Image (spheres, rainbow, N blue to C red):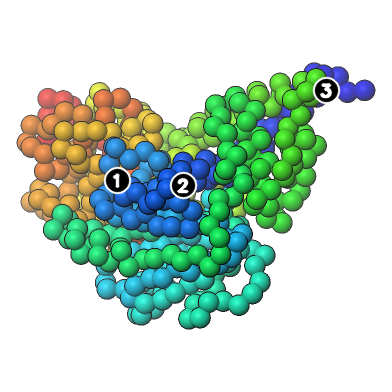
Amino acid sequence: MTSNTAQEEWAYVAGVQAYVYGYPLVEIVRTCALMTAVDAPTEYGRAPVNQFSHCPRPWTHEDRDVVTPANDLLYSMAWLNLADGPVVLAMPAPTGRYFVIELVDAYSDNFRNLGPRVVGPDASRFALVGPDWSGTLPDGTEEIRCPTNLVWVLGRVLIDGADDMQEARAFQAQFTLTATGQSRLPQSVVDYQPSSPSDIAFFDNLARAMQDNPPPARDAGLVAQFARLGLARGRRVDTGPAGEARLAGLQRAAKAGAQLIEGHTRSRRAQPWSINYAGGRLGTDYLARACTAMKGLGALASDEALYALGDFDANGEQLDGARQYVLHFPAGQLPPVDAFWSVSIYGSDFYFADNPIRRYAIGDRSRNLRRGKDGSLDIQIQHTEPRQGISNWLPAPAGRFYLILRLYHPRKDILTRDYVIPAVRRVDESTAR
C-alpha cells in the first residue's frame, strides 16, 4: 500500500508538470472571464462574447487587463466561442497602414495572423469555425478552422502620431464580427474561480478548461499522467479524506509551479537582451509557453513580430529606476524591420507605470527625437527627468523594471541573429545626458 508521503510526493511532482502545462490555458480562461464580464462593449478591451471592443486610444498605465501591452497601436479585442457555430470576421481593404488580426487558441498559441501580407488587396470575410464544426459556410467567406472553440481575437492598428488618430480609428471600426449561432460563454469561463498561487482552485479551473478545449493529440501522453492525480477533463480534484495527501502535494505544486514560471520569465544568464524566436507558437515547449503567458500573453508569432526582453544592463545587473541608463543605437544600426519598432518600459508587475509625461515607449515614429551629429540615437532611461530635456527620455518607474523591444515584420538579419541589439548601459549620474 502506498504511503501518504509517497502519494503526496507523486502529486507534487506531477502537479508541477500540470501547473506548467496548464498555466496558459487557465490564464486564457481567466482573461476571458475578466474581459467578457460586461453587458455591452466598452472602449478599453472588454465586450460580451463574440463582439469586438475597439479601443480608441493606445493603452497606458491605466489599462491592466492584459500584461505587457504595446503603446503604439489601437487594440481591437474579442473573445469567441465557436461551439455554437461559425463567427464571421469582416476586414477592410488594406490601405498601406500596418495592421494585424491575431488569432489565439485556448492554449495561448497564435495559430493564424491576418494582415496586409496575407489577405490580399481587397476587403475580405473569414468564417472562423471550431475544430469539430461541419456545415455550410456563410456566403462569401473563407474558412479558418480553429484548434479550439475558445478563440481570442486580438487586432492591432498602427497609429502614426496624435494627428493620425482619427483616420486610424475610422480604419479600425471597419473590423466587424457576426455570430451565426448563439453567443454563450464556455462553461469553464462561467465557472472560473480566482485562485492564489497555492490554491487548489487552479487545478479545478484547468480540468474545466480542458473539458471545453480538449488538449491537442500531441499532448496525450503528458495529459494521461495528470489523470492519475484525479486531474482530468471536467473532473474535480478529490479533496475528501481519501485525497488529503494528494491535496497537500498539489497545493505545494501550485506554489512551486508559479515560482518556477516566474523565475524563468527573466534571462537565466543575465544577458542584456533575450529573444524567443518561436514567439507565440511554442508547440511542446511548455515552460516557454507558460513564461510567455505570464509576461506577454497574446504574443505574435515571430514571422509577424519579434520581442526582445531586456531585464539586465550591460554589466548583468537588473534594471532599476534608482539608476540611470542609455540605450545607444549607432548610426545605421537601428532595429531592422519592414513595419516598425519601439522600445517599451514596464514595472515589475508587468504593466506600464505612471509617469509625468505619459510616455511609455520610444520608437521609429516618435517625434522630435534628438540625434547625434553622426545620426546615432540615444534613448535615456531613468526615473528623473534628464538635464537636457525630455525629447529622448523614456521614464522609468522608481524600482525594478524591464524593457521590450518590439520588431514588427523583422528583417532577415535579426531573424538570423546577425544583428545584435545594443546593451543598455548604466551612466554616471553626474554625466547623465
Q: Residue at x 67, y 65 (%)?
A: 132
CB within 8 Å, label 1 to label 2: no
Q: Residue sitting at 38 percent across and 36 percent down?
A: 350
Label 3 sits on residue: 242
Q: Please, what secondary structure does the residue beneath circle 1 have?
A: loop
Q: Secondary structure at mark 3?
A: helix
Q: Position of residue 249 (x, y in %)?
A: 71, 24
Q: Quadrant of the C terminus?
A: top left
The residue where tag 2 is placed is 36
Q: Say whether residue 128 is visible.
A: no
Residue at position x 17%, y 52% in the image: 366
Provide residue 349's location: percent of width, then percent of height: 38, 31
Within the image, what quadrant is residue 428 found in? top left
From the viewer's perspective, is residue 7 above or below residue 37?
above
Where is residue 146 drawn, in percent x and y? 58, 63
Q: For the residues marked 3 and 2, what is the alpha-carbon distance in whole angstroms?
A: 38 Å
On the rendered image, what quadrant is the N terminus found in? Answer: top right
For the residues carrying marks 1 and 2, which lies nearer the camera in this image?
Answer: 2
